[in-house]
Amino acid sequence: MDIENSKAQMKKGILELCILSIISRGEVYASDILAELKKANLIVVEGTLYPLLTRLKNEELLTYNWFESNSGPPRKYYQLTAHGQKFLAEINQSWSDLVNSVNTIIKN
């Protein structure tokens, strides 16, 4: 059994929750999302983040605004939609329930 594969699959399963949680705090630029994930030891590359952000936008969970940048092209800042806020609340509850269930099993 490959432990690295198992760890990667667990991380992949919670990435959406983490990204939506970061965006829920206010408008955020993609590199800020990556930095926060890295700070939490959830190393994610742009090639993983951008397709996920596109999927979340297509599902109408988030939207974005363009802002001019002093150091290059305009930047895309993401924020949750009302639908995204509701979805995040539901997924947070599911996460909490899952953590409690797993902890119950692990402690026994």
Image: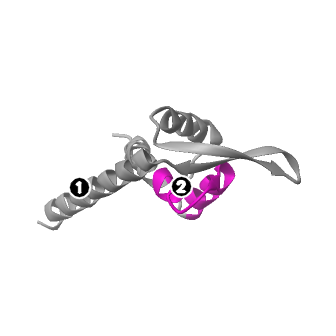
Q: Is residue 14 above or below residue 22?
A: above
Image quadrant where one finds the N terminus: top left
Quarter of the image for residue 26 reads bottom right
Image colouring:
one colour
Q: Position of residue 107 (x, y in %)?
A: 16, 67
Among all residues in the image, which is located at the extreme front?
A: 82
The residue nearer to you, when weighing 88 against 97, is 88
Quarter of the image for residue 35 reads bottom right
Q: Residue at x 68, y 52 (%)?
A: 31
Q: Is residue 81 above or below residue 106?
A: above
Q: Residue at x 60, y 54 (%)?
A: 33
Q: Position of residue 88 (x, y in %)?
A: 38, 52
Proximity of marks 1 and 2: CB atoms separated by less than 8 Å: no
Residue type at mark 2? Ile
Question: Can you identify the residue that label 2 sits on?
Answer: 23
Question: Can you identify the residue that label 1 sits on?
Answer: 98
Q: Magenta region, mostly helix, strand or loop? A: helix
